[in-house]
Image (cartoon, grey):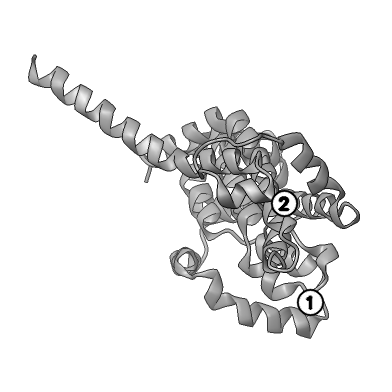
Amino acid sequence: MRPAIRTRRLVTVLLAVLAAYFLMPLYWLVVAATKSTGDLINSSPLWFANPQLFTNLGELFSFGGGIFWRWVLNSVVYAGVGALGATLISACAGYALAKCAFRGREALFNVILAGVLLPMTALGLPLFLLMSKLGLANTYWAVLLPSLVSPFGVYLSRVYAATVPDDVLDAARSDGAGEWRIFAKIVLRIMSPALVTIFLFQFVAIWNNYFLPLVMLSDNQLYPITLGLTSWQGFADRQPILQTLTVVGALVSVIPLIVLSGALQRFWRAGLTEGSVRE
């Protein structure tokens, strides 16, 4: 066997093992979501036992007056509006940092880039105090406003905006187009792969965010799925069925992410690839 073929097979086996490793939690989630509360504790964790997925789904959607649907709607609002707003703001900021010359531009960009390194846990208390001062704590705005900030999105937008040809912008200005029209009609179209990437990353980050809603919200009617399911898990000792509903809810919560990633994969893969070789 030639060394090249042996190496290729070794790499294939290694990738298959890694794929199985990363897919194992999802497999466990699917199996666990089909079990009753008793089977969830007493049966093999990696195999089915008296599957009753649809019964569990019915209980999930009806428990507590259908509160799970409210949490789904809240997550859609937080993640959808937050990701859309963060994408637009990042596009504007990235274009300005790439194409507009002003004093302190590089220093401002470096400060924004440093924001990538700041963990949400370090910002939780200052954000809560700020929102409390503004009277926005325990409202939708308390989660939405911080979600509009994406330092990584600004960085990726600047990388893409730098690739927009200056000749195209000058030609548009010569034809009488204003700056906002140039940005909306030309720049956004050229930057579309990066914008899809930013939207997807921000959507997933907000959808999975647990700490920020935990700090900001006290009304369970405003909870996203992550915080709602965690609250159920806390009461599982008194109501064992909540343990099963938490697992089923977790399975339902990942479905939108899988669908969105599958639908947008050809855009965000192109965005990541091109962004990695420029600047």
**Going 84% across and 53% down the picture, which residue do you hit?**
63
Kind of residue indicated by mark 1: Ala
* Image quarter of residue 229: bottom right
Position of residue 74 in the picture relative to residue 205 (left or right): right
Q: Position of residue 257 (x, y in %)?
A: 63, 41
Disc assigned to residue 212: none
Kind of residue indicated by mark 2: Leu
Is 23 or 178 nearer to us in this picture? Answer: 23
Position of residue 137 in the picture relative to residue 200 (left or right): right
- Secondary element under disc 1, as helix, strand or loop, is loop
User: Which residue in the structure is indicated by mark 2?
Assistant: 245
- State how far apart marks 1 and 2 are (Cα): 29 Å
Residue 123 in view: yes
**Going 48% across and 70% down the picture, which residue do you hit?**
118
**Going 50% across and 70% down the picture, which residue do you hit?**
119
Seen as rendered, the residue at the extreme left is: 2
Seen as rendered, the residue at the extreme top is: 1
Position of residue 105 in the picture relative to residue 264 (left or right): left
Is 268 or 257 nearer to us in this picture? Answer: 257
**Going 83% across and 80% down the picture, which residue do you hit?**
135
Q: Position of residue 76 (x, y in %)?
A: 76, 49
User: Which residue in the structure is indicated by mark 1?
Assistant: 137
For label 2, the crowd category at 10 Å Cα-Cα, with few meaning under 14, some 14 to 19 and many 20 or more, is many
Mark 1 vs mark 2: in front: 2
Q: Position of residue 150 (x, y in %)?
A: 58, 58
Q: Position of residue 188 (x, y in %)?
A: 63, 39
Tell me the quadrant of the picture where the N terminus can be found: top left
Position of residue 55 in the picture relative to residue 272 (left or right): right
Q: Is residue 203 shown above or below 258?
A: below
* Image quarter of residue 238: bottom right
